[in-house]
Amino acid sequence: MRVAEVRRQDMDVVLDALGTVTPVASATVRVRVDGLLQAVLFQEGQVVRAGQVLARIDPAPFEVALAQAQGQLQRDRALLDNARLEARRLTDLVRQDAASAQQLAAQQAQVAQYEGTLKVDQAAVDDARLKLGYTQVTAPLSGRIGLRQVDPGNMVRSTDTAGLAVINQVQPIAVVFAVPQDQLAALKGRSEGLAVQAFDRNGGTVLGRGTLMAVDNQVDAATGTVKLKARFANEDSRLFPNQFVNVRLRLDRLKAIPTVPEAAVLRGAQGAYVYVIDQGKARMQTVKTGPREAGRVAIQDGLTGGEQVVIDGSERLEDGSRVEVVPEAAGRAASGASGASSAEGGRRARADRGAAGGGRPAH
C-alpha cells in the first residue's frame, strides 16, 4: 500500500458552475423612416464602430419634402416681414391721429399670428431635415454585426421587427452563471472584483480570465440558485455569444493549509477520515475537508502537516493495524515489488492486522 506526506500549500477556495456567454450590449439595427433600401454598406460578421454608416435608404422623397418645407417657411417669413412693416406704419399714423388704435391692435395680432406660423414652418423644416438624415442608417453601438436580414432593393419600414441586422458588443463580453443559494453567505460583501475563469466544455482549456461584475437581486425559486455576471476583456475573441462554458469563481485563497491527495480521504459513518501512520500503526483520524485543487484536498481540521497518510490499500486496514514503513527499494527486495511506488516520498507501507507481532500481514 502507498503512503503520502501531508503537505502545506496555498489553495484557492473556488466555486464551479456552468455559464453562458452573453454580449455586454446588444442592439437590432432598424430603419427609422420608410423607404427603398438602396445600399448595404457592411460585411456580415465584421466589427463595426458606433456611428458607422451601415445602409442607405433612397433619399429623394425626403429631399423633396425638405425643399417643400423650406419654401413654406420662406413664404411665411415674407408675410411676417410685411405684417411687421404695416404695424410700424400704423403706429406712426396713430400718433398723428390718422389711424385708429383698433386698426393697430388688429395688425399687431396679425404679426403674432405670422410669428406662430413661422415657428410651425421651422419645425416642419427641422423634421424634414431629420428624416433626410435617417436615410443614412448608422450603427447604434460598437461590436460584431450579424447576418443581413434584408437585401438592397426591398422596401423597409420602421415597424419591421427583424431589422437589418443585430450588433453584439463582444469586447468586453459577459458570462452569466448560477451558483447555489447556500453560497450567498460566502459572496456577501464581496460581490465585485473576484477573479473568474472561463473554461471550454471539457474544462481543460482556459478561454478567458475576468472579474465578477454583479450578483442578481433574487434567488430563482425553481432552481434554488442565484445568477452572477462576470466581465471578460475577450481581446482574443475566444468567447462567443451564447457559448456554454465552465466557470470557476475564486472566493478566497487559503495560506499554507495542510493538504492530502484525494485518494487519502475516506468516508464513513463518522464522516471524512484518513489513516495516519503513527509509530508503526495505522490510526484512523477524522478530518474536516475544504476545497479541492489539482487532485489534492485541503484539510481544515484534523491534520497539521508532515504526517504520513495512506493513499492506496486502506481497505485492508483497521484502526490500530500494525504498519511497517520501509524504503521503496528495500520493499521491492523483500516482497518482490507488489504495488506501485509512492509519488510523494517514494515509501511503501506494510500493514499487519490484529495485535502487534501477530496476525497475517497485509500487502
Image: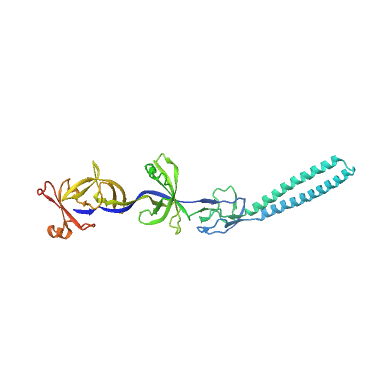
Instruction: Locate residue 358, reporting x and y percent.
Output: 9, 48
Answer with the quarter of the image where residue 269 lies: top left
Tally of numbered discs: 0
Please name the colour scheme applied to the rendered image.
rainbow
Instruction: Locate residue 255, reporting x and y percent.
Output: 33, 52
Work out whether 94 lies above or below 294: above
Residue located at (82% from left, 43% from top): 107
Instruction: Locate residue 220, reporting x and y percent.
Output: 42, 41
Q: In this view, does 104 lie to the left or right of 187?
A: right
Instruction: Locate residue 212, reporting x and y percent.
Output: 43, 50
Q: Is residue 109 left or right of residue 39?
A: right
Work out whether 222 lies above or below 136: above
Answer yes or no: is residue 180 visible.
no
Residue placed most toward the observer, 133 or 269: 269
Residue located at (20% from left, 49% from top): 276
Residue placed most toward the observer, 43 or 295: 295
Q: Is residue 15 left or right of residue 117?
A: left
Residue placed most toward the observer, 213 or 45: 213
Answer yes or no: is residue 108 visible.
yes
Residue located at (67% from left, 55% from top): 60
Residue located at (40% from left, 53% from top): 198
